Image: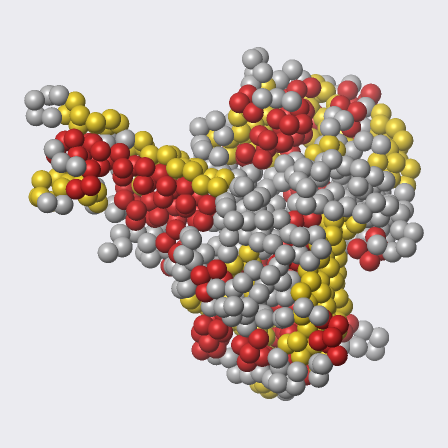
């Protein structure tokens, strides 16, 4: 009987957060801490001719001013191509150029304004199309000259192409010749922002013995330690990175940016404690954002709707520096077709430098972007075949024995069951065939569908660890390197542990803050891999714990360890279950009636390393980048006013194969949260740049998000096809609610207005322009 799995358990940090007691990085005292402020570029592409800091240094309270000359090192998780502070050249508007360390914030702000920078403007490229055009200005003169951190990055010399990935299977040219219907479309999706409620922030201090202490709002504390250690030749053991609660990340707090700057600032002032917090406007313009994407999709099918071939090209706008973008390009390549059986495929994915803000991972790791292109194409193809869009998807759904784009064979355990998801979403969304229905004059209702899938792209040797200790009352403490940023991963790990030990979940206490000196390493809190990777480590640590308890119990009860059972907070012999020892009396060893000591203190430890993954073959893309897939189906219903080109979203539905529902309400909420992000992203969010690459008003007065009261009815259903290699069969799911929503909304609005919408965001203005009324 389950004790914790499958129950709607309250999140472990809930009370701290709802009572305001939770402490985030910028909640800690600022007394005795110097303030740091950044000066950023006002040009998208320019030479730095001169930086004059003399006036800034005269401001009372200013301790130091840093420029690119103070840090010649280059940084990046995949390619070392980004300076901490621009040196010689700026490559995007908002790039940090100088940094002031001062006694307080007003002094730092005043000094930043007094720094004089002379620029020599250079040509800008603002889209991947411009960047790959013949004779396009090069953003990096040594595209293939930077040091690569990983081997599967393929920059192309003399171009703005930072990397390229290719998928090939079957014979697409021949297959297209046999198609009855062919759809070919071009898509454009702009960059946008993560917009977590907590802006990025970091603190740094260097003690007299050389110990570097970093406190940061980061999803990847161990990556912070690694990059600082390697860049500045500091032993990793001399670097302590601490992460309290993170106020939302969505992938945007996985990069290492402010931590490096905070370290440089502290080093410049003799190791004193410094605090670097950037305001919202600077966070939006300077910190890494979500990718932009251009794509050209060609798909062919028989009259009955059977897809025969696909030819796809994706151009990922990585901005001025690569960060993790090449791996987002790789992720698109691996899953480029969506969850469909397409035997003949040609796909190229290019990661391209532009003079935009550089990009990084965003919830869904580029899958929301490419899925919009694929699923819009699928809808157009379905209608050309005169088929119900859901039935068309059901007809082409990937099945066991089919091959993915990277030629991994499908199985139910590996990927789940898309057919069940499609069958289940019909009643959940009240699917009516996907045709526009006239409600009254000028008002129509329409529904749009989309399918999605996603596998992960971690390092092939990514690791995770867990340590479990006991309290005198018999409860346990769980310590991992997982960052709590609102995703509830720590709570689910506690449920996994409680289930394994057969105890109540309230007997599991979780160490929420991460400290790299005391918590076992966890690769990163990204890719929805917490339950898989850290879950394996927790199970392993629990097994170690149980073995030790059996050993203590065998000695105390005078029997073999094989006879000992451990459950419900007790250790007992199967032969005599009435003779038991409570955890509290045996977890620190056992004292016999005669006073003699028996056994040892029980401390469980467990580790996990990913296995069975590979890099992709650069010729045909063959390989396996993630442990498994998660897939599902989504539907969005809209009510549209065809005269005013406005609309409202009535309902959004998702059915997802999660393998095993660990915590029903928490998982439903997480999926609904992703759906809300998808609706906001698709209906209103985008970065806008002028002709020379300057962001237009990067602030929350003009960059609009979905607000409370604007949200539709969220409907979430689950399919449970266990992933046999995952703890209790659970699949990755935290990101997936967002992936198909932009496409489903695009399909619904295209149906409602009778137009083909091939770009985002789908604002009333854009719909009006597409409707041909802009010139009337």
The colour mode here is secondary structure
Residue closer to the observer: 295 or 275:
295
Q: Residue extending furthest top?
A: 208
The vertical placement of 371 against 76, above or below, is: below
Image quadrant containing the N terminus: bottom left
State the residue in front, 646 or 625.
625
Q: Does residue 750 appear in this view?
A: no
Q: Is residue 537 visible?
A: yes
Please tell me which residue is depicted at 53% across the width and 22% down the height of the picture: 237
Q: Tell me: 746 left or right of 296.
A: left
| Residue appearing at x 58%, y 83% in the figure | 388
User: Is 683 placed above or below 10 here?
Assistant: below
Please tell me how many numbered marks the rendered image carries: 0
Percent position (x, y) of residue 155?
Answer: 77, 46
Residue found at x 55% / y 68%: 402
Q: Is residue 686 left or right of residue 43?
A: left
Q: Quadrant of residue 64?
A: top right
Question: Looking at the rendering, which quadrant does residue 569 occupy?
Answer: top left
* Residue 28 position within the rendered picture, expressed as x and y whole percent measured from the top left: 51, 30
Image location (x, y in percent) of residue 313:
74, 62
Q: Residue at x 59, y 63 (%)?
A: 404
Quadrant housing the C terminus: bottom right
Choose between 391 and 17: the one closer to the eye.
Answer: 391
């Amino acid at each position: 009987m389950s004790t914790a799995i499958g129950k709607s358990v309250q999140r472990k940090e809930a009370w701290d957060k709802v009572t305001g007691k939770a402490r985030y990085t910028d909640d800690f005292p600022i007394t005795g801490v110097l303030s740091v402020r950044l000066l950023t570029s006002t040009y998208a592409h320019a030479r730095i001719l001169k930086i004059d800091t003399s006036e800034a240094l005269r401001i009372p309270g200013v301790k130091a001013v840093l420029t690119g000359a103070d840090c010649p090192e280059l940084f990046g998780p995949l390619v070392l191509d980004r300076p901490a502070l621009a040196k010689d050249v700026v490559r995007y508007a908002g790039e940090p150029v100088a940094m002031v360390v001062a006694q307080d914030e007003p002094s730092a702000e005043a000094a930043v304004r007094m720094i004089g920078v002379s620029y020599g403007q250079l040509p800008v490229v603002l889209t991947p199309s411009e960047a790959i055009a013949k004779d396009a200005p090069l953003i990096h003169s040594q595209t293939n000259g930077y040091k690569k951190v990983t081997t599967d990055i393929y920059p192309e010399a003399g171009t703005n192409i930072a990397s390229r990935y290719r998928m090939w299977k079957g014979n697409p040219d021949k297959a297209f010749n046999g198609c009855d219907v062919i759809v070919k479309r071009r898509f454009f999706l702009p960059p946008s922002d993560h917009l977590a409620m907590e802006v990025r922030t970091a603190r740094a201090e260097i003690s007299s013995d050389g110990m570097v202490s970093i406190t940061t709002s980061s999803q990847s504390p161990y990556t912070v330690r690694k990059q600082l250690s390697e860049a500045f030749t500091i032993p990793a053991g001399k670097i302590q990175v601490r992460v309290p609660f993170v106020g939302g990340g969505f992938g945007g707090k996985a990069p290492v940016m402010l931590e490096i700057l905070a370290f440089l600032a502290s080093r410049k002032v003799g190791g004193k404690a410094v605090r670097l917090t950037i305001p919202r406007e600077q966070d939006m313009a300077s910190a890494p954002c979500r990718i932009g994407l251009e794509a050209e999709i060609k798909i062919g099918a028989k009259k009955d709707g059977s897809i025969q071939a696909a030819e796809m090209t994706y151009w990922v706008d990585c901005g001025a520096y690569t960060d993790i973008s090449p791996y987002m390009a790789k992720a698109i390549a691996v899953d480029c077709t969506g969850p469909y059986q397409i035997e003949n495929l040609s796909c190229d994915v290019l990661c391209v430098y532009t003079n935009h803000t550089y990009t990084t991972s965003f919830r869904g790791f580029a899958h929301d972007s490419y899925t919009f292109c694929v699923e819009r194409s699928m809808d157009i193809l379905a209608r050309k075949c005169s088929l119900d869009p859901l039935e068309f998807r059901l007809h082409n759904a990937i099945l066991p024995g089919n091959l993915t784009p990277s030629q991994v064979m499908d199985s139910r355990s590996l990927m789940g069951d898309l057919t069940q998801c499609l069958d289940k979403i019909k009643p959940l969304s009240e699917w009516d065939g996907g045709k526009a229905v006239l409600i009254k004059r000028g008002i129509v209702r329409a529904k749009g569908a989309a399918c999605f899938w996603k596998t992960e792209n971690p390092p092939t040797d990514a690791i995770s660890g867990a340590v479990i200790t006991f309290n005198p009352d018999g409860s346990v403490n769980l310590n991992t390197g997982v960052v709590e940023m609102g995703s509830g991963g720590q709570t689910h790990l506690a449920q996994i542990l409680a289930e394994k030990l057969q105890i109540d979940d309230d007997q599991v206490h979780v160490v929420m803050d991460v400290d790299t000196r005391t918590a076992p390493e966890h690769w990163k809190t990204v890719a929805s891999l917490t339950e898989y990777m850290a879950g394996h480590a927790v199970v392993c640590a629990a097994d170690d714990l149980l073995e030790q308890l059996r050993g203590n119990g065998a000695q105390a009860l005078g029997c073999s360890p094989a006879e000992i059972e451990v459950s419900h907070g007790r250790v007992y012999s199967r032969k005599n279950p009435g003779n038991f020892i409570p955890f509290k009396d045996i977890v620190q060893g056992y004292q016999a009636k005669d006073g003699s000591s028996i056994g040892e203190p029980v401390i469980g430890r467990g580790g996990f390393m990913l296995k069975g993954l590979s890099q992709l073959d650069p010729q045909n893309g063959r390989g396996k980048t993630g442990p498994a897939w998660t897939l599902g189906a989504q539907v969005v219903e809209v009510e549209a006013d065809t005269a005013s080109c406005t609309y409202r979203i009535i309902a959004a539905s998702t059915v997802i194969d999660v393998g095993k529902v660990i915590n029903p309400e928490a998982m439903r909420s997480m999926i609904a949260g992703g759906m809300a992000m998808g609706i906001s992203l698709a209906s209103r969010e985008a970065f806008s740049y002028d002709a020379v690459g300057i962001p237009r008003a990067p602030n929350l007065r003009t960059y609009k998000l979905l607000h409370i009261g604007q949200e539709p009815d969220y409907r979430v259903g689950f399919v449970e096809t266990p992933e046999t290699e995952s703890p209790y069969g659970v699949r990755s799911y935290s990101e997936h609610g967002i992936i198909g929503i932009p496409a489903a909304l695009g399909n619904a609005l295209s149906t409602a207005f009778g137009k083909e919408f091939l770009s985002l965001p789908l604002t009333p203005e854009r719909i009006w322009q597409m409707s041909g009324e802009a010139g009337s």
